[in-house]
Amino acid sequence: MIDKPRGTRDFLPEQMEKRKRLEQRMRAVFECYGYEEVATPTIEHLDLFTLKSGEGIIEETYSFEDKAGRKLALRPELTAPVMRMYVASLQMEAKPLKLYYFGNCFRYDRPQKGRYREFWQFGCELIGTERPEGIAELIALAYEVLKESGLRHLILRIGNLDILRRFLDGIGARDAEIMRLIDKKDFDELRNRMAEKDFDEFMKFISIKNLDDIPYEEARDMKEMLSFLEELSVPYNIDLSIARGLDYYIGTVFEIDAPKLGAEKQLCGGGTYNLVPLLGGKKIPTSGFAIGFDRALVALEAEGYAFEESAKPVYVAPMQDMVSEALRVAKTLRKNGIKTDIDLMGRNMKKSLDYADRRGMNTVVIVAPDEWQKGNVVVKDMQKGEQHEVARGDLPSFLKKFHS
Ligand code: AMP
C-alpha cells in the first residue's frame, strides 16, 4: 500500500462537506467587498519566490527542475504569483484593483496540527491605494471573513513597520537579523543582541497602546486608519512588535489569531508592501493578506462549531424489472433540481431500504409495478415509517414539500 506524502491529507466526504461550506462563506465575503477572484498556476519559476523572499525560501519550498532544466517550484504562497500576474496583464486597469484568490500552497515545513506541507490560503491584494480608508477596509475584510466563517474568538493585532523601523533606527539597532528575531518573538536572543538600556526601551516601546505616546508623524496616519476601522466596528489591539520579516513590507502590518489554538494560532497575516517594482512593474502601492484556510477550520472545530449538514438525496428504489421506470423517475427528479440517488446494485427492496437507512437517506421513492400501472409511485418516510401513494406527475412538487 502506498501512503500519501508526509504533511498532506486526504479529505473524506464529511470533511470535504465542511471545507466546501467554509469556502463558500469566505468567498461570499470577499465578493461582498467588491473583490474579484483570480487564479494562477500551481507551479511557478523558483525565481519568483527567491526574488520576493530571498534564497532562504528554497529550504522550505518544493522545487525541482523540469525536463528542459527549468527551475520550478510548487507555490509556497500566492502574493508573488498574483503580483506577477498583475505586472504581466493588469497594470493598465483602473485602480484600485481588488483581487482575491483561494488556492493550495506547498511548504516543506515540519508537519503538526495546523501546519501542513500542502495547505490552502484564501487571500487578496488591494492594488493602487495606500489611503487609510483603503487599509482600514482591507483589515475589516480580513476580520469579517473570519468572523463570518463562524469563529467567535479572534484577536486582531495591528502594527506599523515605519514606526518600528524609526524606533530601531533611533536606538541604532535596526538590521535584518533584529527584524527577524522580532518577527519570531525571540526576546531572549534580542536581549543578547541589544544593550540593556536599548532592550528596556524596546520592551517599553512595543507595549505602547496609545499612539499619542509616539512622537513620529507616521503615528498620526496610523491613528486615522484606526479611526476608520472603528467606524467599521472592527475591534483591534495595537501591537508594535509585528515585524513580518521581509524588507518590502512597509507601513501597516496586521495579524489575526485564534487564541484557542496553541502554537499554530495565527490565522491571518497581512499588510502594505512594495513588491511590484521588484517584479519589474511600475511602482504602485499594494496591500493584502492571506488567511490559513485549514487553520480556520481547526479553530472552528476547537470552538465546537456545529457545521450544517447538507440534505441527503431522495433514494429511488425499483422493485424487480422496474429499473427503466426508476431511471426515468430519477431523471425527472434531477431535472427538477431534487438531489436524487438510485439503486445501482440490483438489490431487492429490503436490502435497498437497508442501504438507504445506512446512508441516512430518509425519503425513498419505491417504483413498484402495481402502482406504476395506476400512474403512481410510493414515497416512504424511513423515520416515521409512513407511506404515501403519489401520482408520478405530482412527485417533484410533492417531494419539494415532503423532503427537506
Ligand atoms: P504567511 O503566508 O506565512 O503569512 O501565512 C499566512 C497564513 O497561512 C498563516 O497565518 C497561517 O494561517 C497559514 N499557514 C502558513 N503556513 C501554513 C502551513 N504550513 N500549514 C497550514 N497553514 C499555514
Image (cartoon, rainbow, N blue to C red):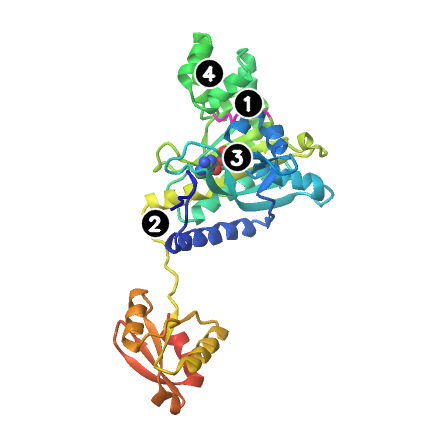
Q: Secondary structure at mark 1?
A: helix
Q: Which residues are magenta?
A: 241-247
Badge 1: residue crowd in 10 Å (few <14, some 14–19, many ≥20): many
Q: Toward which corner of the image does residue 117 lie, by quadrant?
A: top left
Placement of the C terminus among the 4 image quadrants? bottom left
- What type is the residue that disc 3 sits on? Tyr
- What type is the residue that disc 2 sits on? Tyr
- What type is the residue that disc 4 sits on? Phe
Q: Which residue is mark 3?
A: 62
Question: Outermost residue, right direction?
Answer: 92
CA separation, marks 2 and 3? 34 Å
Q: First in sequence: mark 1 or mark 2?
A: 1
Q: First in sequence: mark 2 or mark 4?
A: 4
Q: Secondary structure at mark 2?
A: loop
Q: Which residue is mark 1?
A: 163
Nearer-the-camera pick, 190 or 369:
369
Estimate the x, y position of residue 48 in percent, counting from the top left. 63, 33
